Image (spheres, coloured by chain):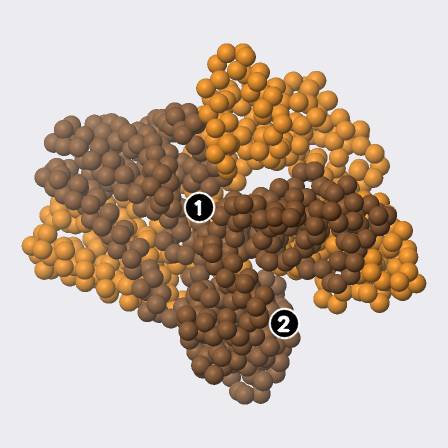
Chain colours: A brown, B orange
Amino acid sequence: MSEQFSDLIQEVVNADDPIDQESLSHKIAVQDVIDIALLLESLPLEQRLSIWHTLPRHKRLEVLVEMRGDPREVLLEATSDEDLDELFNDIDAETLLELSDSMSSKLIDKAVDAMDKKQQLHFAGANQYSEEQIGHWGNRDNLILPLTAKVSDAKRFLRREVPTYTDCIYLVNRAGQFSEAVKLFKIYSTPDHTPLVDLAEEDISAIKASEECASAALTVQRSGYTSLPLVDDEYRFLGRVDIGAASELMNEFYERQLMAGAGMDEDEDLFSPVRKSARNRALWLGINLLTAFLASWFIGLFEVTLQQVVALAVLMPVVASMGGIAGSQTLTLIIRGLALGQVTSANLKALMIKELKVGGLNGVIWAIVIATVASFWFESAMLGIVIGIAILINICAAALAGVGVPVMLDKLKLDPALSGSVVLTTVTDIVGFVAFLGLGSIFLV
Amino acid sequence: MSEQFSDLIQEVVNADDPIDQESLSHKIAVQDVIDIALLLESLPLEQRLSIWHTLPRHKRLEVLVEMRGDPREVLLEATSDEDLDELFNDIDAETLLELSDSMSSKLIDKAVDAMDKKQQLHFAGANQYSEEQIGHWGNRDNLILPLTAKVSDAKRFLRREVPTYTDCIYLVNRAGQFSEAVKLFKIYSTPDHTPLVDLAEEDISAIKASEECASAALTVQRSGYTSLPLVDDEYRFLGRVDIGAASELMNEFYERQLMAGAGMDEDEDLFSPVRKSARNRALWLGINLLTAFLASWFIGLFEVTLQQVVALAVLMPVVASMGGIAGSQTLTLIIRGLALGQVTSANLKALMIKELKVGGLNGVIWAIVIATVASFWFESAMLGIVIGIAILINICAAALAGVGVPVMLDKLKLDPALSGSVVLTTVTDIVGFVAFLGLGSIFLV
């Protein structure tokens, strides 16, 4: 973040003698846990571990919570069993939920056993929902009063410290179902005997625990409230989704999309061990290799033509690249639309037509430019015409695939942000090569 | 978002006769403004305009605020001067700041003239900072009391309705500089005569108005407070940055990064007019065309070789594609690290070495796989060796470029999320083609 932060990385990387290191670990220990987490993620493995071991014990758990999955795992793997036992000894349910991905099931069981009843219930309740559901991440703050309660009851209830991101308390009926929300500042400024129901908010709605994380998080961010009540399918009050958790979930959602474009996930570590990192990325390279070989196979069909007209080989990348770029523009737009729920079967046809028109217009313009360049370069008007037509065909195909591929993947419950570009590039490569070499074999040989 | 939402799009797209349309516009008018904004963005131009004209006037301004830049402009362009005057007649400063990008300067002047003094000051104050600075987007809520104030003063001050996302009031010294923050719930539960300073928070820090938006927004999201005080360079209190605004800014930041990967911006309209859309995208296609021609020119250097060994032409895309994919993985990781401030000159060398090792490992593995396939396919062990070495060279070059290119662009104050992939692909294409065809011309001819 700040220059100070960059200086700190520099200092750690350069620290050699033990005196340096001691004053340094003091300096790091007083930082905010979020900054320590960011710092650890930014350090090469050796330094990361040495700083980790000098961190004050009481800060370690909080630092782990703030870290991404992969760099956190590196630290946990380097921590002795004894230290781990101590670390997780009085962990609360919320922290355990954040960390359990990086913990062995034995360690999780141990931590759960050490919890009090209330925390155990929270942990078990959250685990009734998958990590993709908001119920897994909501807190279990019990800010509830019965529907019949008065302002005086609320004032008594609020004498203790309220949790962060609290702006309302919630009224539940006898079945424990969420019914109304009352803003705190209204309670403080209203006479004691007033029924709380009289102060209820009009426009607040609850979040269903089974709802998908990102959509629930966005609802909280946009509600104007600092938290919304979390309910089960029977509308029974479970806890709250606060805007702090919602913001974290949204940031993670976007980070996942950004990393997915390169076949990685949001937990990827800047300094993961080389083997692990190579393994993580190998699958993606392998998938892409298959599609590249497929494209090559199609090129291979035109070996004879290529031998006769070598200019075709020289210009092949231009045709493929223009299709790929045009397609990725449409793809990116549609992926965002799908994520926002704005692309549906209702407007799909209209979208296809619009993108085809945009592709057609750009296709014609760039076909003319490329045809002209190619004609002069290789002194062949016919080559110009062939590449021009191939470009037009490929850009139009890219527009259709740019809409069709992500929508199809979404229907198949595959993440278009992850696999969209691979499939799209395969289409534009093959269409481009076949159109260009095919036309070439007809008109240039 | 919801199924209901998708049904609504369907209904609008299918609505034909006037009765349909009337009941439909009633149904839309009662929706939340955010949902109306999303709906309008999801509609083809014709339907978007017809729904826009049926919206109740008092909702129009709020709907515009929630929309993205490009679709909003389409609506404003289709609104008569008279209606625009009415629309912007009693706009407040915060709304005007959101919309001014889509308004003519004449219209902005008119709106400012119609404002009261306080709103005019807010507007002028915000415009002292650029759109990239948080000072432009902070609110100007004046939740301040003098440092000497008591709890009783605060209680009197809080009798009015507090703005959304308020959890503290702020104490300023005589020079108007931010000094302390006091949580509201502490005020309510403390005797009247207590000095407010006694209740001050220990760990709150102010946001400098000149700070870059995303970094300030992240600080607010992570602070645990629902807003942080906004100050100028002399630490004078200006207003607040609340977590609602911070979340919007972060979401926009991520959306910009996602769209930048395809050379577009976050304002891009799902249904923009064809010409506008084609124009927006043409530049990106043009830049990529230049790099594709550059790659072709390098291939052209080996025309003679290609004619003699046509297998080289067939396999060229494999070499280029493997480099491009490996490079984009490193690039994506580094771009995220730069955005989080985790990649600095201090750890650059260590990152290069790590990525080179990962690239080397994956390079060797895939070189062997590809060499084997190529040897059998074209029945030439030498061709296998040539492509294997080229793959290894290109994946290692991709690792270095994947770290070096975004860092260099960042130093040049260019957005690596926007131009990183173009530059990187150019490098991997050229290195790949030259290595493969160069080795081929030596060993296969």
Q: Nearer the viewer, residue A372 or A365?
A: A365
Q: Residue at x 71, y 41 (%)?
A: A201
The residue furthest top is B18
Q: Residue at x 80, y 50 (%)?
A: A151
Q: Residue at x 52, y 40 (%)?
A: B266
Numbered circle sitting on residue A31: 2
Label 2 lies in what chain?
A: A
Q: Secondary structure at mark 2?
A: loop
Q: Residues within 10 Å of mark 1 (few under 14, many from 20)?
A: many
Marks 2 and 1, how far apart at CA = 34 Å
Label 1 lies in what chain?
A: B
Percent position of residue B159, x then y: 86, 47
Q: Looking at the rendering, which quadrant does residue B24 occupy?
A: top right
Left or right: where B35 falls relative to A81: right
In this orientation, does residue B49 appear? no
**Amino acid at dot 1:** Gly
From this view, report whether residue A36 is shown above or below residue B323: below
State the residue position of label 1. Answer: B261
For the image, the number of numbered tags is 2
Percent position of residue A427, x then y: 27, 39
**Amino acid at dot 2:** Gln
Q: Secondary structure at mark 1?
A: loop
From this view, report whether residue B7 is shown above or below residue B133: above
Percent position of residue B384, x then y: 14, 58
